[in-house]
Image (cartoon, grey):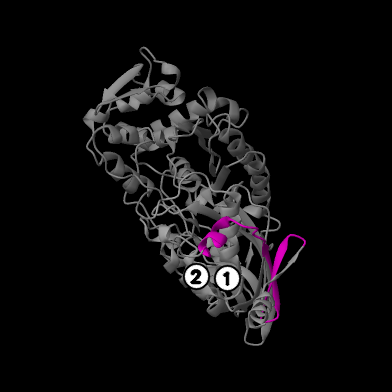
Amino acid sequence: MGKRRRVAERRGKRPAVLGGMVTVVVGGAAFGVYALYGGGAAAEDRTATTAADHETPQVRTGPLTAAEVTGTANAFLTSWQQGQIARAAAVTDDAAAATALLTGYAEDAHITGVTLTPGTPAGGRVPFAVKATVTYKDVTKPLAYDSALTVVRRAADGKPVVDWHASVVHPELADGDTLVTGESGTPPVKAVDREGGELSAAEYPSLGTVLDGLREKYGKKAGGTAGVELRAVRGEASKRKKVSDKTLLELSKGKPGTVRTTLSPTLQAAAERQVASRPRASVVVTRASTGEILAVANSGSFNVAFQGSLAPGSTMKIVTSSLLIEKGLASADKVHPCPKYFTYGGWKFQNDDKFHINGGTFKASFARSCNTAFISQAPRLDNDSLTRQAQQVFGLGMNNWSVGVPTFDGSVPVQSAAPMAASLIGQGGVRMNPLNMASVAATVKSGTFHQPYLVSSEVDGRTLATASRAMSAGTLSQLREMMNYTAAYGTAAQAMSGLGPDFGAKTGSAEVDGQEKPNGWFTAYRGDLAAAGVVQAGGHGGDTAGPIVAALLRMGG
């Protein structure tokens, strides 16, 4: 009788199986997870000890079974749901990081009442829905979002574990980021365009990260008061990428202060339409004479236009041409070599489709984007020649722009041998984004570098970056002539058709390892407007980014 009584007691504590789901009741809260019917990681972990267990364990190999995936997901999600942080973390491949973030989820983010509902696995990936409550002092608000985890085999023993990343906890987190709920350190802002109209991510989808950046920089200065919110606080890795903190849930509204930007509502709306027509497209429009940013748009969620770091391809030849002309190594209307191949530093360089120009001028090589015309001058340059030209004349690569939101200010590192030669045509280690290349076109148009800005320095008294010198009048005249010729008769002619005569342009195609098509670049000016765009993996710049840029310049008159 005693034995039967003990069996009954144990059975009374088992979860009930309802419709193929196990319902776990912990402290009055129900939690639905995958049911395991034999096998799986959780079942294997409960296997009784045998003599074989004392032998040297074998590393499990082969694809994960469905039972291993669901069992591991079950063990992790159940433990997280129940607040058993150590147990949940032990199911991952980085217990320390998982423990820290899951602990902060409850203690720093003040998230309680967590319910996790798994979806249908796809391979090792298991999606799940999160419902919870965020409570801070006397303010409470429900929280709901979708996330996912991935089960992998641990290298050491082949055991299935959760591949740990911060995005498991919330998809908006990168590794090193955390979740915090409290009075926002920065009050909200009401950003307005140059005409006083309010800017919102709902109307202008590309401005989401821009508005986050404006709040981070001007929230305390604009006169608003903070509300209570759950936000993603960026770690060091995200900060190095200049990613701003992000509000995930607003529990109570603060009072916003107003920040006036330089954006043109007409051009911004047009830029949004233009990038929406192509995947992975980004564009920036500036006023050449002042540096005011009139439009910024991206078809993706990351702000490539301001923060991208991509090889600019042949659009960099604008900077290189100014260098060669200043040094007397080239002249717009003088004959300049454009061979089919040129070897330097052990690399053999060639032109698109292996073309060559016999007896052509430097202007012709620029307009047709002849790579070897530039590579052939590498032996006559110092390793730091291009770096100094980019910094001193075009204000690039010194990490000192103060735009009003986070930006990447271009990079032209000192290189030697073949990488130095490749940098002359915008490859090698050179990295830019549309904001940088719009500024390059603007510098040629205005004759002087004007740091681009989104918020006037009069708002906060910050100092804008300057260039240490300007191009000589002769160099500037030749560069304008070459860009005008390219817009009228060269690789940019089709896109720029009908926009002359006061215009100039340069196309670019940047090869990327592992990418079938190059990134297509285009930078140009018309009147007092300068613009640049890139379409990643799009192909030739004249065909992809060119129409986007030209459409916006056409609006500016």
Asked whether 73 or 167 is in front, the reply is 73
Q: Which label number is shown at residue 80?
A: 1
Q: Residue at x 36, y 38 (%)?
A: 473
Q: Could you tell me residue 202's position as x and y percent?
A: 70, 58
Note whether 364 is above or below 293 in the view shown: above
Asked whether 513 or 2 is in front, the reply is 2
Q: Which label number is shown at residue 251?
A: none
- The extreme front residue here reads 1
The C terminus, quarter of image: top right
Q: Could you tell me residue 487's position as x and y percent?
A: 53, 28
Note whether 183 is above or below 507 in the view shown: below
For badge 1, the amino acid type reads: Trp
Q: Is residue 38 magenta?
A: yes
Q: Which residue is mark 2?
A: 101
Q: Residue 350's image quarter?
A: top left
Note whether 357 is above or below 169 in the view shown: above
Q: Secondary structure at mark 1?
A: helix
Write down the region rendered in magenta: 19-47
Q: Residue at x 66, y 54 (%)?
A: 205
Does the image show residue 326?
A: no
Q: Is residue 57 magenta?
A: no
Asked whether 283 or 171 is in front, the reply is 171
